[in-house]
Image (spheres, grey):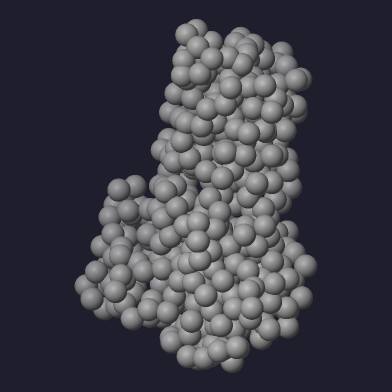
Amino acid sequence: MKDFKAEIEFIYSSAIKAVNPFEAVKRSIRMKGGKLELSGGGGTAGSYDLDGFDRIFVVGAGKATAPMAEAVEDLLGERISGGCISVKYGYTGDVKQLEMIEASHPIPDENGVTAAKRILEILNGAGEKDLVISLISGGGSALLPLPPEGVSLDDKRAATDLLLKSGASIHEINTVRKHLSMVKGGNMARAAGRATVINLMMSDVVGDDMDVIASGPFVPDDTTYKSAMEVLEKYGLEGTVPPSVSDRIRSGIGGAFPENPGTGSRCFERVTNSVIASNIICLKAAASAAADLGYNALILSSMIEGDTAEAAMWHFRIAREVVLTSNPVPAPACIISGGETTVRVTGAGLGGRNMEFAMRFARHSDGETRIASCSVGTDGSDGPTDAAGAYCDGTTASRARKAGLDMNAYTAENDSYHFFEKLGDLIITGPTNTNVMDIRIMLVR
């Protein structure tokens, strides 16, 4: 099975390299004759005469934002007047002209508040003759926390933690977070006033919905306070979140606070939003790497979401179908999928959705030595751990039994990290400085 493991490592490493943020920015914007050109849809999406602007500011937040900022600095150099970015601890870069603040993810901290306030200060000071380049990537929502008056950061942290553990999707979590923030849901566009804004985004959400990426600070928000309350009610959290959170949302429903700026709002007239990298790019690179190894590669979808346990079960069924019938692709086969599943946390263990997927997959594939799999977060971080994900194959369950590990007990406790740590099958990449959701790879011989 060692060959399986080495091949899987080659495939996911190739996929992660394909969504390098520095290169993604360089593919999307370029200088041509004193003009900054934004590409999109196979052509030029916008052209900006830099001589027509008094100042250029760069702002942003996310796990991939530091290398994105490096690319912009490399391109514009001393034309940049200043700016600020918020990044996850350890996800830094060689940024020379911008203030870079490290903050906590997925649960926000005071450093994130400091970054959000600093960016708002920059945006509020920008005028009609200024250009703002925004660099947004996955994780930006937690890295830009600025709760409204009456809601403490601790209360917002508690609400976020409850949502993460409830199994709510990122779309649902961000619907709530956008209504507990002074910067999300288009409010940065509102702060920028009449400045021209180019907002470059690396997508970490299923479907690349721009209003969900980092909770859409420069994107119209057509959700409402009522939408936020419906999410809390769906997961039985309306009476569990801190009272200040539910009170804020109820007051918003009653009209005490204005809704976030939505489609048609004037603050978006000079904002151009562009998704420059996404999960499907990652999956195509994985398929190409698998083909180089002699596998028949098949991409299922870049939009897999829902319950992690169910996803693991039907992913195994597809691999088993290949073994038995050579459908939907004959062996040797590499079946690839992307997206972001959710785990309903009921235990007190340590783990994340990728390691949970691998542990569940291992239970189904017990004894099936023709199948191996992994699930990896492209950001290098699965849940609150130092692992990106985990590897499993048909020997995982038997090796666990020999080591005296009760897989059922680890599953009940959501303790996938310690399970795979004891087996030596954690995938640890360190910070990748990118983030385009997850990639799952199944090899079938």
The answer, for residue 120, to whether it is visible in the render is: no
Q: Is residue 44 above or below residue 284?
A: below
* 103 to the left or right of 178: right
Q: Is residue 123 above or below residue 318?
A: below
Q: Nearer the viewer, residue 409 or 19?
A: 19
Kindly identify the residue that appears in the image at 67 percent across and 33 percent down. Answer: 289
* 70 to the left or right of 187: right
**Residue at the farthest top position:** 324
Q: Quadrant of the N terminus?
A: top right
Q: Name the spot of residue 15 as percent of width and height, x first.
A: 64, 41
Q: Name the spot of residue 260 as percent of width and height, x first.
A: 34, 73
The answer, for residue 165, to whether it is visible in the render is: yes
Q: Nearer the viewer, residue 84 or 146?
A: 84
* 167 to the left or right of 92: left
Q: Name the spot of residue 40 as percent of width and height, x first.
A: 50, 61
Q: Name the spot of residue 161 as percent of width and height, x first.
A: 49, 54
Q: Nearer the viewer, residue 11 or 427?
A: 11
Kindly identify the residue that appears in the image at 50 percent across and 56 percent down. Answer: 42
Kindly identify the residue that appears in the image at 67 percent across and 71 percent down. Answer: 72
Q: Is residue 46 above or below residue 290?
A: below
Q: How many marks?
A: 0
Q: Quadrant of the C terminus?
A: top right
Kindly identify the residue that appears in the image at 52 percent across and 75 percent down. Answer: 47
**Residue at the farthest front position:** 33
